[in-house]
Amino acid sequence: MVVVNAMGKLCPEPVIMTKAEIEKGTAELEVLVDNDIAVSNVTRLLNTKGFTVDLTRTGNERKLTAKKTSSGEAAPAKREELLAILVAHDVLGGDDKELGEVLMKAFLGCLSKLSRRPAVMAFMNEGVKLVLPESSACGYVKELEEAGTKILVCGTCTTHFGITDKVAVGTISNMFEIMEMVTGADNTLIF
């Protein structure tokens, strides 16, 4: 069994290291990490690639034991054009923060009502503040997620702002997964 030692590695290194091992054709592996965000990110990657995952914790070490059981996600028969939105600010527009907050809330509100919503929305930098319960726009982000939009929230950003445990919607993610989803879309909007 191959061991991927990602102890002490910052996001997204544990995911990148694990993906590299999967691409070599490894069918059984152990991934060692030292934080819960890495556990979540690596587990999600392994599951999408057809692995079952067991977690054991010993002190600060988290060991993910993974075994390939299927070929992973099946490709859709007919693919609709995908839109991704990368949100890097908690306001929309220029220098007027009050107006910017109103515009961002209106933008997300309108987006949640469209018949064709984005496939993925990624929140980074100050944009992560929009997925907090006290954000006036959080309800619209929840509506988007409930309608099928994948909501990814940068774990490095939530850690930086000290808000990881307050995130009310979406999945705490990493730069690698966010970039993979955003660059895999047919069209991308950045705010």
Image (cartoon, helix red, strand yellow):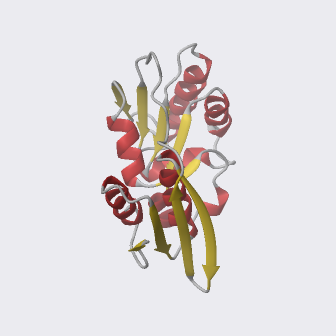
Q: State the image coordinates of residue 123 (x, y, percent, origin top left).
A: 48, 45
In the depicted view, which residue is nearer to us: 23 or 119?
Answer: 23
Compared across the picture, whether 143 is left or right of 118 comes to right
Up-down relation of residue 47 to residue 190 (above or below): below
Residue 52 lies in quadrant: bottom right
Q: Which residue is at a point 62% across and 34% down the rendered structure image?
A: 145
Q: Which residue is at a point 48% across and 36% down the rendered structure image?
A: 121
Up-down relation of residue 124 to residue 27 (above or below): above
Q: Which residue is at a point 67% across and 31% down the rendered structure image?
A: 146
Q: Residue furthest bottom?
A: 59
Residue 84 lies in quadrant: top left
In the rendered image, the quadrant that contains the N terminus is bottom left
Q: How many marks?
A: 0
Up-down relation of residue 91 to residue 110 (above or below): below
Q: State the image coordinates of residue 15 (x, y, percent, origin top left).
A: 41, 60
Q: State the image coordinates of residue 5 (x, y, percent, origin top left).
A: 40, 76
In the rendered image, the quadrant that contains the C terminus is top left
